[in-house]
Amino acid sequence: MTENNINDFQPETGTHLEETPPPPADPLGQRFVDLIIKPSRLMDNVGRAPFWVLPMVIIIGVMAIFTYFTMAISGPEQMELMRDSKIMQMAGEGAWEKAYQDSLNPSSTKLLMTSVFSGLQIGVMMLLLALILGFFAKMGGGKGRIVQALGIVSWASLIPLALSSLIKLPLILQTESFYGTTLGLAALIPDGDPSSPLYQVLLTFGDFFTWWGLALLVIGFERVYSMSRGAALAAVLLPWGLLSGIMVGVGILAM
């Protein structure tokens, strides 16, 4: 008997001790409950088994449905906002009128294609966000794998993307206003102009469901990547703030 086997030998039975089995995988259904009531337990389980494809597929599907039912409202509203924009001025006379008329009655084929593309676009953005946040987490001393970052981003994004869209959908259909329906600080502006810089800033940085999703991301990277709370905050908020600021800036300049 070798020295390595002596420690594993059980004298009473003359057999060798077996290795402790890994903890059983948590039921996937429990993860959706933990997303709301116990996010720390959810992220611990994500660290063991990311299962990132399921929440991403759900988000892609919800966003495609959301786009399908709201495009007839959001399209004309967006064109109204862009009537006097720099983009329309460069497009030439008559371009806005044609684009506006096309947005009023989109065909079923256009609705379906745009909806599918919108969902897939969200999926690609989630993949890129996972790569970016995983990189920043590594730079901040985190110890984790990219597949775990995918899991963190996918599960955390269920709140600001899927849940938020499902809540906003009936409100948009009821009010027939896409840009006027917001679940954040922008709603506090009376008769807010969606094209104003203040409204766009509040729409992006003042959304309650976005804050919720960011909190889940911080918890996820803190627990899965074994980071301090401060390091996890920096790894999540810095790149998110930079990317969001660029998008808001481009939108303001385009108007």
Image (cartoon, grey):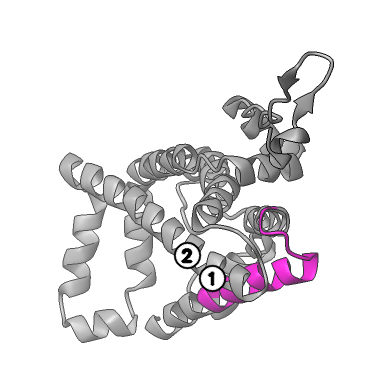
Disc 1: CA contacts within 10 A as few (<14), some (14-19) or many (>=20):
some
Q: Is residue 159 left or right of residue 2?
A: left
Q: Is residue 33 above or below residue 152?
A: above
* Cβ atoms at labels 2 and 1 below 8 Å apart: yes
Q: Is residue 60 left or right of residue 28?
A: left
Residue projecting furthest to the right: 12
What mark, if any, has residue 131 been given in the picture? 2
Q: Which residues are magenta?
A: 224-244
Q: Which residue is depicted at the point 76% across and 36% down? A: 37
Residue 196 seen anywhere in this rendered image of the structure: no
Q: Secondary structure at mark 1?
A: helix
Q: Is residue 219 left or right of residue 236?
A: right
**Image quadrant of residue 187?**
bottom right
Q: Nearer the viewer, residue 138 or 158?
A: 138
Instruction: State whether the magenta stretch is mostly helix, strand or loop.
Output: helix
Amino acid tagged 1: Phe
Residue 108 screen position, x and y as percent: 19, 40
Any magenta on residue 225? Answer: yes
Q: Nearer the viewer, residue 146 or 10?
A: 10
Residue 109 screen position, x and y as percent: 16, 42
Q: CA distance from mark 2 to mark 1?
A: 6 Å
Q: Which residue is depicted at the point 50% across and 69% down? A: 132
Q: Is residue 240 above or below residue 255?
A: above
**Image quadrant of residue 16?**
top right
Quickly name the residue at label 1: 135
Residue projecting furthest to the front: 1
Q: Is residue 223 above or below residue 42?
A: below
Q: Which residue is depicted at the point 33% across and 42% down? A: 68
Disc 2: CA contacts within 10 A as few (<14), some (14-19) or many (>=20):
some
Residue 97 seen anywhere in this rendered image of the structure: yes
**Image quadrant of residue 35?**
top right
